[in-house]
Amino acid sequence: MKKLFVAINAKNIHKAIAPWSIKAYCEDNGIKDFLVLETNINDATFEIASKILLEEPSILMFSCYIWNIELIQKTAVLIKELLPEVIIILGGPEVSFEEELPEYTDYLIRGAGEIALCELIKKLEKGDIVKDKIISGCNNDFNDFPSFLTNEYFESFSGNQIPFIDKQLIYYESSRGCPFSCSYCISSTDDKLFFLNLDRVKNELKLLINKGAKIIKFVDRTFNANKDRTKEILKFIYSLDTETTFHFECAADLFDNEMLKIIKKMPAKRVQFEIGIQTTNEKTIQSIGRYTNINLALKNIKMISSFNNTHTHVDLIIGLPYETMDSFINGFNACLNASPHNLQLGFLKMLKGTRIRAQNDFGAVFAAFPPYQVYKTNTLSHIDLLKLKKIEILVEKFYNSGVFINSLNYGFSLFSAPYSFFESFANFIFSDSVHSNFKASIKNSYTILLDFLIISGQKNASEHYIKLDCLTYDSRGLLPDKITSKRDKQKEIDYKRINNTKDNIRIEYFEYDKKYRIFNYSKSFLVPQVLS
């Protein structure tokens, strides 16, 4: 029987881990003819179905998440019509809490899938009648499971839409489970926590690096849950001679002084941290069972950001219990005052299987379809959430892009707090069709921000900071039309001759502080230098 595991990823740069882990386990236990098909949500239903039909599988497996479940449903229904004898098996977090089997499905596996799926396939290949259509997997110690980093895994890159490992986001799992019990997260439904052996982790990371991986994202729910283990891995990563970046999801209040010292020594871009603050409202924190030392977490975020070698990404959730506009604004300001490089505002999703969905004691009105986003609560109206959606759009475009740093810092100084700046900016941008066109081009974005800063502050200062950002982050030097370039090409010629360089440089005069600055676009880290 031919087995085909279809992984529909959120983006074509993502490299799924689930199908390869399950394939490795099944093959290690004697199952043969097991194939993996990787695609993404941008592919059409018929396109995915066509690839499946060409393989003519006897057993077809899908890993289901909120971002791909609708596409899987459409694809599976079509496949069942064209290949009625195929056995379709679903797994993954989006279906792990279903009480009934979808009509287009033959079997459903809840939870971790390696052992349960392997046993099911063995029974099906023997011709056994498997009466239980919904099968519970379990979170096991996976130290004895074979590595998913097989020759076939690495060879699979050549067949992907992006056929190079250095262009892909590589997922890696060094632990399973989560020690915390946040009510909005499905990881809280299983409190078992298992860690891979450290020697195995080190050897597998070396293998990925040797194969050319440039971005490795640990899918561990809380990477620094075990402090000693975390320090050992960070020390190992520090010791490597590599340009690979390692991404971790961490609890900021669990960083201790020794851990911070290790991070501070890291080469630039070696590590980056995704940190879930989620809320600073103490009543909300108690309600969702998160139990975070918020003050310590924010202090550590600010410290790590100040190292200037490590990217910090902070999450806030909009729509949690007891969260009001005032308390959310307080959290927003507190997070931005910690100076993370990225602030993600995510709207609460009432995921299947979570305690918060089962209880829903805070009047949440949410979508019945994925991703189950909340539209109002008893403390946040739908008007509040629509307003915060505009703030989220502007934060993503102007703060998270990282190309308006000096201009935003100047803008923040004109208002009582960062939220006040974004609120006023949102009113300015979305009040007419001219300014709402900020996504048209980077030049247009700088122009619109300049217009806002001029009416909020001083014209010469606004032009200075916009010009500084524009020339720092856009090598084309496409300044807003209102700003006159004062590029000195003769100084550029002299500089190149004196320094014997052919670098792509630009020397610009800034009237605001009466200084020349040199921008070297041949450097990977562009920091404009004041010319003496």
Image (cartoon, grey):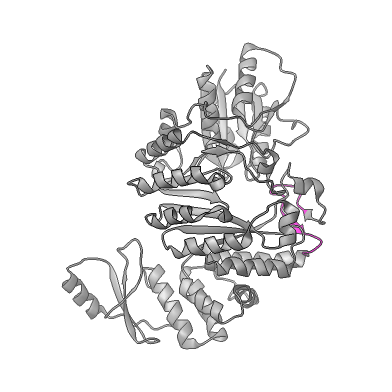
Q: Nearer the viewer, residue 26 or 196?
A: 196
Q: Position of residue 259 (x, y in %)?
A: 47, 52
Q: Nearer the viewer, residue 104 or 172?
A: 172
Q: Quadrant of the C terminus?
A: bottom left
Q: Is residue 222 above or below residue 436?
A: above
Q: Is residue 455 above or below residue 311?
A: below
Q: Seen in the image, is 58 located left or right of residue 200? A: right
Q: Nearer the viewer, residue 427 or 194?
A: 194
Q: Is residue 48 magenta?
A: no
Res. 33 in view: no
Residue at figure coordinates x 52%, y 16% from the top left = 30
The range drawn in magenta is: 366-380
Q: Position of residue 152 (x, y in %)?
A: 43, 29
Residue at figure coordinates x 57%, y 63% from the top left = 298
- The answer to which quarter of the image holds residue 3 is top right
Residue at figure coordinates x 36%, y 63% from the top left = 525
Q: Nearer the viewer, residue 511 or 300?
A: 300
Res. 517 in view: yes
Look at the magenta stretch and give its main secondary structure.
loop
Q: Quadrant of the N terminus?
A: top right
